[in-house]
Image (spheres, rainbow, N blue to C red):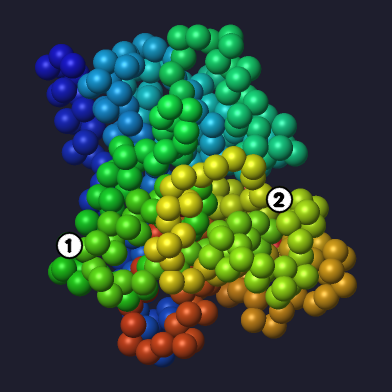
Amino acid sequence: MTNDRIAVYAQLANQIGNTPLVRFDNLLPNGNTLYVKEECRNPWAFNHYVRVYFALYRHFEEAGVIVPGQRVYDFTSGSAGIAMAAIGSQLGYHCEVAMPAGGEKAREDAILQFIPKEQLHLTDAKTYVDGAASFNLRFRARNRDAFFFNHSMVMENGLPMINPIVMAACGNVAEEVFAELSGVGPDTFVAVSGNGTTQLGYGRRLKELSQKTRMVGLECFESSYTFEKLYPGRAEAMYGVTPEMRKQFPRHGLPGTSFPVHFIAPALESSVPLLADEKLVWWWKTIGAYEALTGRSVPADAIFWDRDIPDELQGYGRTTRAGYAVANALAEETAGQSYLIVAYDLADRYDSPTGR
């Protein structure tokens, strides 16, 4: 890498990270404290993937794998694609982004701030993230020079493996939290399970720094993928929903968190042993589908991510609200504890209705 490019990366690096850790003393019951790590304050894309893609671009350019002006692409439910396009536009890359149709148009609009419309590819809405594999095959066949970032994993000898560059970038978030808390980790970290990259990246490093910290994952009830990994057979026994029935639920309103998929997510698999618990979150659209499929009422202790969100958190994205809902439920059983959630993005990245 030339001295000029080193200077460009150094300038961008100075603007990324060191995001605020905001303390709320009155949002949880029983004298529990809530901390929100505002990854939504990263520049350009305003989400947690800014760190990840900056690290990926720098790593692959230093290694001579990519060069400015080259075509690069990735598949996303929204946030990752915004960050890839935002960082790529700063660095002079030709970015192509694929995402499932039928999602949050606000995310499409955010991506289109950085790339032309013809470079945003919407795949079949019914396949959701499963459409990534078929898109990759088609796109690769037509664009042999294009570089596939594949932020959720790396392939080694044909096998999916954890991406160490992504893990290191996410680990920096945990290190900042630990430093901001003066070397004392939170009692509980509530993490969105998703494809596992942030859950493992943040959580593993946080637990290395603070042995007392317990990690509780969350995902949408419509998926229960990680829940099933942690508690085999429990979801069907508790809720009467088989894996096949889950395919009949409408797509949930928390893109990037979870949904039935059929590919291996190595970071997610590796994060499961670190979890002390996994919580399922519900929303209003789940109710009718659940009752119609099972003939049952929604459990009385169901955690709804779209209810009773404090005004102080309204500006954060839905995944942050889901984190709060889980932390609030957990705090009912503790006193004087500290809870950490991440503000992955902002409320303006969602535009589908949430009300009843």
Judge left or right: residue 306 versus residue 84: right
- Residue 214 visible: yes
Residue 305 position, x and y percent, is: 59, 67
Furthest residue toward front = 157
Q: Which residue is at 48% across, 51% downward?
A: 268
- Residue 341 visible: no
Residue 199 position, x and y percent, is: 42, 55
User: Front-most of 201 and 161?
Assistant: 161
Furthest residue toward left = 3
Q: Quadrant of the C terminus?
A: bottom right
**Which quarter of the picture shows residue 66?**
top left
The crowd level at tag 2 (other Cα within 10 Å; few <14, some 14-19, many 20+) is many
Disc 2 residue type?
Arg
Q: CA distance from mark 2 to mark 1?
A: 38 Å
Residue 139 position, x and y percent, is: 59, 17
The crowd level at tag 1 (other Cα within 10 Å; few <14, some 14-19, many 20+) is few
Label 2's element?
loop
Q: Which mark is residue 251?
A: 2
Residue identifier under label 1 = 179
Q: Which mark is residue 339?
A: none
**Which quarter of the picture shows residue 245?**
bottom right
Q: Which residue is at 43% across, 27% downward?
A: 157
Disc 1 residue type?
Ala
Residue 61 position, x and y percent, is: 27, 20
Q: Earlier in the sequence, mark 2 or mark 1?
A: 1
Q: Quadrant of the N terminus?
A: top left
Q: Which residue is at 26% across, 27% downward?
A: 58
